[in-house]
Image: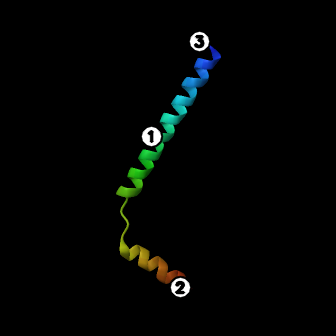
Amino acid sequence: MSLKTIKYFSTLIVAVVAVLAAWWLWNYYMQSPWTRDGKIRALSSRIAA
């Protein structure tokens, strides 16, 4: 394999891994539970302190 081919495939692999990581993080963020009570409590404690 030539150096140009190795650079091309390594860039392609890094790009694919980055896209997969971004997709996983987006799904994790959208599926993680977030309650209003927890958010209100955090905002209230910051204001009260």
Along the viewing direction, whichever of 15 and 30 lies nearer the viewer = 15
Give the secondary structure at mark 1: helix
Q: In which quarter of the image is the C terminus?
A: bottom right
The residue sitting at 57% across, 24% down in the picture is 8
Question: Do the numbered discs 2 and 1 sit on residues whose CB atoms are within 8 Å?
Answer: no
- Find residue 24 and report its horizontal and vertical position in percent: 42, 46
Along the viewing direction, whichever of 29 and 19 lies nearer the viewer = 19
The residue sitting at 59% across, 12% down in the picture is 1
Q: Is residue 11 left or right of residue 24?
A: right
Which kind of residue does numbered mark 2 sit on?
Ile
- Tell me the residue that label 2 is attached to: 47
- Find residue 7 and report its horizontal and vertical position in percent: 61, 24
Which kind of residue does numbered mark 1 sit on?
Leu
Q: In this view, does 15 lie above or below 33?
A: above
Q: Please identify the residue farthest to the bottom as the structure is shown.
A: 48
**Within 10 angstroms of label 2, few (less than 14), some, or many (20 or more) residues?**
few
Say whether disc 2 or disc 1 marks the residue closer to the N-terminus.
1
- Tell me the residue that label 3 is attached to: 1
